[in-house]
Structure formats: structure tokens, C-alpha cells
Image: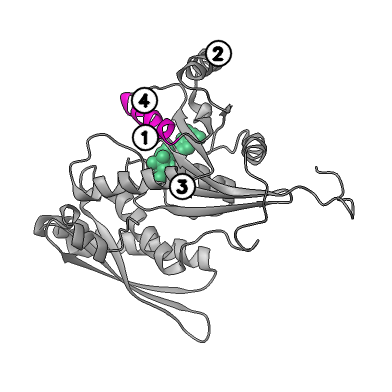
Amino acid sequence: MSAPADEDRPVARHSGFVALAGRPNVGKSTLVNALVERKVSIVTAKPQTTRHRILGIVNRPDAQIVLVDTPGLHTNARRALNRLMNRTAAQAIAEADLNLFLVEGTRWLPDDQAALDRIQRVGRPIIAVVNKVDKVKPREKLLPFLAELGKRAPFADIVPVSALRRTNLDRLVKVISAHLPEGPPLYPAEQVTDRSERFLAAEIVREKLTLALSDELPYGLSVEVEAYEVAPDGRVSIAAVIWVERKGQKAIVIGEKGERLKSIGRAARLELKRMLATPVYLELWVKIKENWADDERALRSLGYESR
Ligand code: GDP
Ligand code: MG
């Protein structure tokens, strides 16, 4: 609780951009959603789910924290899409006031070191966040891991959390706020993200697709919303194209008698209905665009930006 504001001494307000960076799958998007208390970024158990820079805005009486979710930094980026994802993450890190370096307790992989090197190079303060502490067994393994981590870089602080179970998030918010510059809010207090509902709809469809398909296929998929219409009574109609790279992939996405596509559409529609609090009509098509993930121009036309 903060003390009541004196009339002549207003509460100091802090605000700024805070990028969440780290290797794929450490829980960056889960943490953004947990802190914003809304789903602004999709989550799956597969690496490289996040492909864009997505803002999640946390409003507190004394601070506005603009979280920047980023694609995971990874080293074997052969395809144009992967290079662009790395570039998007690197830009977000370079532009942030403060960086959160996410790792998974108690794992340290070569990609963690590569991500840390990348973040250290921009020279902003870094808070290390050790996520997934709910999985650390026995609990005693955590302390030595934190001590080892502390030796790897001069972190401003190290905060263990569980994004999934929402453990220690209040402390994380306090630590972040304390390291942000003083300043007025950057966004209106009611805004939770910079992304449109149309973008969110495409992402929710991609999340359900990724969850429904086997390991390799999701990277060859993209979703484009071609029409998003709100009727006078508030109902939303969405038409979206699922882009795949090959004929065989199209058959896999559609499934036998169209069953897989139907269940993906059902799951996406139900979630959108809940999020938008209105009935949703969702139409999905599957189309082929060969090797779009290797083609910079195709990537841009599908909304993958790198500023
Ligand atoms: P990102 O690639 O870094 O954005 O990671 P995601 O947020 O997409 O999460 C990757 C996977 O880790 C998902 O299956 C999440 O449910 C899981 N996850 C995220 N945070 C936690 C956590 O605190 N505890 C556990 N047990 N799992 C988590
Ligand atoms: Mg993510």
C-alpha cells in the first residue's frame, strides 16, 4: 500500500519500456499475460510461438510498466522468419529502458548464455527473472542456482517467480518499478496492449493450430485475418486464411473429413467469444504459399515487421 498523496507533494510516478528477453520457451509470454492479467500474447509448450513484438501494459498507482514481449532469441536462425524474429527481439531490447532476462529454474543452456550476451551488449540495467520455480524439486536446488546466476552478470536484481502459478509477481512489479525512470504514463490507463482485436484473432487461431499439430509443422504456418466485421448488435464475424507451405501440410491441417480444422476453429471461436464477450462467427480457409517463411517480401505482406 502506498501512503496517501500530499496535495503539494504528488506521488512520484515511474514509467518506461521493459523488454522480456531470453531463449525460446522460458515463459516470457506467460509472464506478460500474468502481469497484465489479460491474455495479450499467445502461449504454447512449443518454442518460437511468439513472432512479434507485443506490448502488455501494467498500471499501478505509482508506475506504468510497458512490457514488451519478444520472440525468443535463438542461435540456429536459418530461415528468414527466424532471422526476423531475432531482429525483432534485438530491437525491442535495444529500445527498452530496462531489460528482464528470463531463465528457467534450474536450467542453463547455451542459448541462455547467447541471449544474456545479447542483452548485456545494449548496456541497460538488467533484472534476472528465474521463472518456473514451481517445477524446481527439491526446493533447495534453487539457492545455488540463483548464486551461480548472480556471478554471470552484474544484474540489478534477481527475482525468482512462477508465471504460471503467479508466485512472487508483486515483488517483481516492485523491483521493476524501482528501476524505471520518473515520468508520466505513456499510454492511457485503460489500454492493455498496442495490438488490435483483429491481430489477437489471428494469433488465437495460430495458437490453437500450434497446439493441435505435431512438432515441426507450426513453424510453416501463418494466419492472416482477411475480414473482421462487427455487426450493429456487437456480433463479430471473422474470416481468416491459414497459410501453409506445401500441399501435404494443407491436408494435415484440414485433417480427415475436415475434422482437425473444424476442432481448431471451434477452440479459437470459443476463446475469442470469451475474450470479446460477444458471439463470434469464424471462417477458416487453408491456402498454400510456397516457402513464405524464407521470403522477406512474403513475410512483410503477412504482417511480420522489422522496423
Ligand atoms: P516463451 O516462449 O518464453 O514466450 O514461453 P511461453 O510463455 O510460451 O511458455 C512456454 C511453456 O512454458 C508453456 O507451456 C507454458 O505454460 C510454460 N510455463 C510458463 N511459465 C511457467 C511457470 O511458471 N511454470 C511452469 N511449470 N510452466 C510455465
Ligand atoms: Mg512467447
Query: Which of the two marks, 3 or 2, is nearer to us in this view?
Result: 3
* Residue sitting at x 48%, y 26%: 135
Mark 3 lies within 8 Å of ligand 2 (Cβ measured)? no
Q: CA distance from mark 3 to mark 4?
A: 21 Å
Q: Position of residue 153 (x, y in %)?
A: 47, 22
Mark found first going from the N terminus, 1 or 4: 1
Instruction: From the viewer's side, name the closer residue of 161 and 119.
Output: 119
User: Which residue is labeled 2 in the image?
Assistant: 140
Query: Which of the two marks, 3 or 4, is nearer to us in this view?
Result: 3
Name above or below for residue 217 compared with residue 118. below
Indicate the quadrant containing the N terminus: top left, top right, bottom left or bottom right.
top right
Indicate the quadrant containing the C terminus: top left, top right, bottom left or bottom right.
bottom left
Q: Secondary structure at mark 3?
A: helix
Q: CA distance from mark 1 to mark 3?
A: 19 Å
Q: Which residues are drawn in magenta?
A: 110-122
For the residues bearing labels 1 and 3, Cβ distance under 8 angstroms: no
For the residues bearing labels 3 and 2, Cβ distance under 8 angstroms: no
Residue type, mark 1 in image? Arg
Residue 254 seen from this side: no
